[in-house]
Amino acid sequence: MPTKLRLPAPAEELTLPALLARNAAEHGDLPALSWREGPDGTAWTTLSWSDVRRKVAVLAAGYASLGVGRGEHVLLMMGNRPEHWLTDLALVHLGAVPVTVYGTSAPEQIAHIARHSRARLAVVEGARELVRWEPLLADPATPLERLVVAEAPEAGPHPTYASVYAGGAHLHRSEAFEKAWRETRSEDPLTVVYTSGTTGDPKGVRLTHRNIMLQSVRLDGHIELPEHAEHLCYLPFAHIAERILGIYLPLLRAAHVRLCADPAAVSVAVRELHPVQFFGVPRVWEKLAASVRAVLGRLPEEQRRAIEAANDLARERAGHRERGEEVPAALEASYARAREGVLDPLLTLAGLDRLVWTASATAPMPIDVVRFWAGWGITIMDAWGLTETSGVCTVNSPDGFRLGSVGRPIEGLELRIAEDGEIFTRGETVFGGYLLPDGSVESASDDEGWFPTGDIGRLDEAGFLWLTDRKKELIITSNGKNVSPALVENTVKEHPLIGQALVHGDGRSYLVALLVLDPELGPAWAQAQGIDAAAATPAELAAHPVVRAEVARAVAAANARLNRTEQIKRYRLLTGEWGPESGELTPSLKLRRRVVREKYAELIEGLYAEPYAAPDEAS
């Protein structure tokens, strides 16, 4: 249920420090923040809301002693660890503006953000980050003056987080702390989020307390959760979704944040904690679905049939709810038996048995993935928004959803669709503008307050928004036809063998594709076909005639559902999974099309060359 906690001010006048003061005073004994530590890294350490506020006060004094003042940008590059979360809040209490930088950022991206933000201080994790940050201290074009390091053994000559805290403990004065945060106004900047940049340099999106507080209060109204629920925090804090879900909403709800320092270990944490809520970008849900499908493929046929029958009941029930219909009593009873006897034991093993709210955002969710999870009684409430809109613009919720859509606008936001299909939005959660190098802000909205989102979509008769693609990513073929690459890619990815895809064809007469063999489902599928997948390398597996033939059938099946212009005429199967570290994905796991096209330019040109090798050849 939406939180019923007292708000210390009207939503439009709220500030983040006011919420922390309320939490410490009224919910001080409740758990606020937990993280793993100890000799083996498995024990949880927990701070209450009272503990959090005391530590934030001490840290604020420590950072103030380093010269951090009101309105100043401070850069943060750390994982999901307590030093990051607490530093963020401490800076806000000083009136400073925390700016988190993705840990996978290249040196040139870091340099751009450091110069553009004019930050004099950066707080980084350890040696891996220092290699990229230390050269900026000697760069006359960069205002950066000092680094603080979280990992003390790796700090070298730089001050450590522990020393900042120790200095703050000596200097802290309660009166000064209370005076500083009370001077903060709702129109003051709360954070600057630099977009992850699928093309070009990242842009600095300045968001105020009012933007974020209104977003949090309105989003909270759509989330059905127990009071003070836990949130598993594993996405980067440079991502607006995790800033909302992992910092700002927990402050509003006096909820419990559990930090997961290693995103790759999130499934382990889920199995341990059995969360009631879980947010994942589409690629996360795709990977989880692939893992489940791989397990199902190894089960006896009789057990698989029982699971499939239970999946069908769950999807039928979800269909009634989606249409706003009452679920027939007989179906509800059959589903309850199937859930208890078939689905719940398996969901419990995965830690997914207690979920009451699941969501996704940032990119169009493949409909087959949505339908897959609906078959397990898990309805993914897909949402849509941008950093520039303080998070979500539209959201599905239990009282109104359409699987495959991204929901309806949240309170206070308007949408309109331009003639070319671009979505425009306006409202109080839309940002004031992009940060300029001189510290001013340049509006990106028109004279009537409409912001062009760059996304293409349509509104149905019930007010639900359906996304098509990014405007800049639409393919215009040589005969002038518009093609949504995401639509084509998601269609071909419905086959379990294909984990990732990129479609190309701008200015060409037909489409070609790069397909990536799924690293989990590929071996499982091959094993089920009698191929010794364990003894085969990924390249050998992708080159196997049985795998190549099945991929060819998958492409043909996808083409049968697409119109002539959208069909893939030629393709190449790759074996190495794309990721942020190798550059093909952004840190928020969105496809960097330009990077992929440049990296595989020779392969793509070969797909258009004559004579042409067989399209089912692996590379």
Image (tube, rainbow, N blue to C red):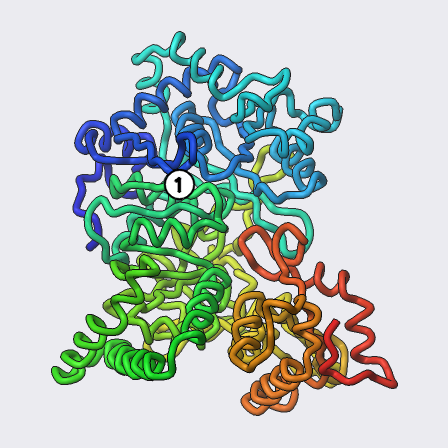
- Residue 353 higher or lower than 439, as above or below: below
- Residue 347 higher or lower than 165, as above or below: below
- Of the 4 image quadrants, the one containing the C terminus is bottom right
Closer-to-camera residue (228/432): 228
- Of the 4 image quadrants, the one containing the N terminus is bottom left
Task: Answer left or right for 462 relative to 511.
Answer: left
Estimate how packed mark 1 is, as few (under 14), some (14 to 19) or many (20 or more) residues with alpha carbons within 10 Å.
many
Closer-to-camera residue (207/603): 603
Closer-to-camera residue (274/239): 274
Q: Position of residue 59 (x, y in %)?
A: 41, 20
The residue tagged with tag 1: helix, strand or loop? strand
Q: Position of residue 26 (x, y in %)?
A: 17, 31
Quarter of image, res 105: top right
Q: Residue beneath label 1, please?
A: 259
Which residue is outermost to the left?
A: 329
Q: Position of residue 475 (x, y in %)?
A: 67, 75
Task: Answer left or right for 558 relative to 32.
Answer: right
Which residue lies at the image location 79% right of the left edge and 71% below the top edge?
603
Which residue lies at the image location 27% right of the left edge and 77% below the top edge?
314
Task: Answer left or right for 530 relative to 366.
Answer: right
The reply to whether residue 315 is visible in this rendering is no
Q: Position of residue 126 (x, y in %)?
A: 58, 29
- Residue 251 higher or lower than 57, as above or below: below
The reply to whether residue 599 is visible in this rendering is yes
Closer-to-camera residue (164/213): 164
What amino acid type should be assigned to the residue bearing mark 1?
Answer: Leu
Which residue is outermost to the right?
A: 611
Task: Answer left or right for 502 relative to 366.
Answer: right
Quarter of image, res 312: bottom left
